[in-house]
Image: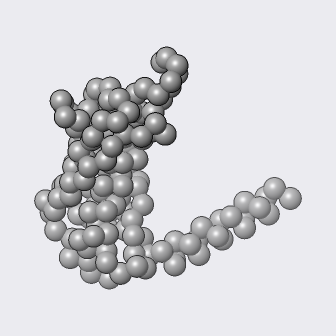
Amino acid sequence: MDFKITLQAKKERKITVKNTQTTSFLWEGENVFSTPAMISEMEETCRLLLKEQFLTNNEWDSVGTVVDIKHLSATPVGAEITLNAEITNIDQRRISFKVSAKDNIEIIGEGKHERFIINIPRFKEKFYKKVKQLDEKKE
């Protein structure tokens, strides 16, 4: 299938840091926006860029395959974060992105992310075949 994905396509989205997105081992209570949560939000921004602009058929989506992210600054619960994604390379169904996240003061994270376009029915079929194989190995 030809998706007509274009280089330099962009997506910006805003989120507010929730207490479920923090790491609390530094001190008691809610505190710092965690690295895994930031990466998850960056990935979702890239996914939404593809879904909203190019993968409008519900049988197609994308999965993350590579993450190369730097977490640069701490951000508290309640802060508004602006996430940006831009397509930097297209290799058939393998799409590369430049990503960043910033709060109202500074850039808090940046890097690269790669996603692979999947056909959901085929992906599910392969996945459940693997689940079955793994279950058989347990027995």
The residue lying at 26 percent from left, 77 percent from top is 3
Q: Position of residue 46 (x, y in %)?
A: 30, 57
Res. 135 visible in picture: yes
Q: Position of residue 4 (x, y in %)?
A: 20, 76
- Name the residue at the right extreme: 139
> Can you name the residue that lies furthest to the top here?
27
Residue 96, located in which quarter of the rendered image? bottom left
Residue visible at 65% across and 65% down?
A: 130
The percent position of residue 134, horizontal first and vertical second, equals: 72, 60
Question: Is residue 60 toward the left or the right of residue 7 in the image?
Answer: right
Q: Nearer the viewer, residue 41 or 31?
A: 31
Q: Nearer the viewer, residue 98 or 15?
A: 15
Residue at image coords 52%, 19%: 28
> Height in image: 99 above or below 87?
above
Quarter the N terminus occupies: bottom left
Is residue 97 visible to the viewer in this orientation of the structure?
A: no
